[in-house]
Image (tube, rainbow, N blue to C red):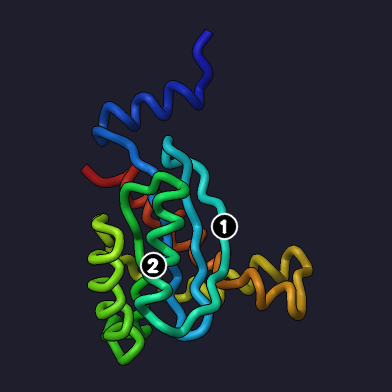
Amino acid sequence: MQSIFRRETENFSERKGRLVIILSVDYGRVRTGVAVCDKNEVIASPVEVIKETRQEVLAGRIAELCEKTSAEQIVLGLPRNMDGSEGESAQNVRAFREILTEKTGLEVVLRDERCTTVTAHGYLNDTNTRGKKRKAVVDSVAAVIILEDYLRYRRNSL
């Protein structure tokens, strides 16, 4: 008997074409969160928080993670203002996208990340994660939220 999970992923595969491992990045000036999904695009998991301010070095580390996880695509959070406009942070992310594309050779998709850090803090409140531990994981949790949103989008499009 075939499991429901297997049927759903096969049906998804038939609808969408090829499934890929996707790496998600919540870019920050000091800390950048990284998450990855499984090959079936079902489970998003935090990978790490990278403490790096130099974009070239950060892109190199993300390229290493892409190779290590066999990622074939990157989704990069785009910080928009609540009215949908883009400020300086969004411009920094767009510039970083170019560097990341060059370093990895992968498609880098931008995804609206409004409220992801707030949501991540809410999740961490629910699990009573406080202090230094919270600071150490909040960015990777935000990367998971960005990735989960993108995976929902992929499942529902086309």
Instruction: Name the quarter where the C terminus is drawn.
Output: top left
Position of residue 51 relative to residue 2, above or below, is: below
Q: Secondary structure at mark 1?
A: strand
Residue located farthest toward the top when viewing the structure as drawn: 1
Residue designated by label 1? 46
The image quarter in which residue 108 lies: bottom left
Q: Horizontally, is 110 left or right of 122 in the view? A: left
Q: Secondary structure at mark 2?
A: helix
Mark 2: few/some/many CA within 10 Å (<14, 14-19, 20+): some
Mark 1: few/some/many CA within 10 Å (<14, 14-19, 20+): many
x then y, percent, for residue 91: 27, 85
x then y, percent, for residue 145: 50, 61
Total number of numbered discs in the rendering: 2
x then y, percent, for residue 77: 38, 70
User: How far, Cα to Cα, is label 1 from label 2?
Assistant: 19 Å
x then y, percent, for residue 32: 49, 74
Q: Earlier in the sequence, mark 1 or mark 2?
A: 1
Residue located farthest toward the bottom when viewing the structure as drawn: 88
Position of residue 71 relative to residue 127, above or below, is: above
Residue 76: mark: none
Position of residue 55 relative to residue 100, above or below, is: below
Residue designated by label 2? 60
Q: Amino acid at mark 2?
A: Gly
Which of pointers 1 and 2 indicates the residue nearer the eye? Answer: 2
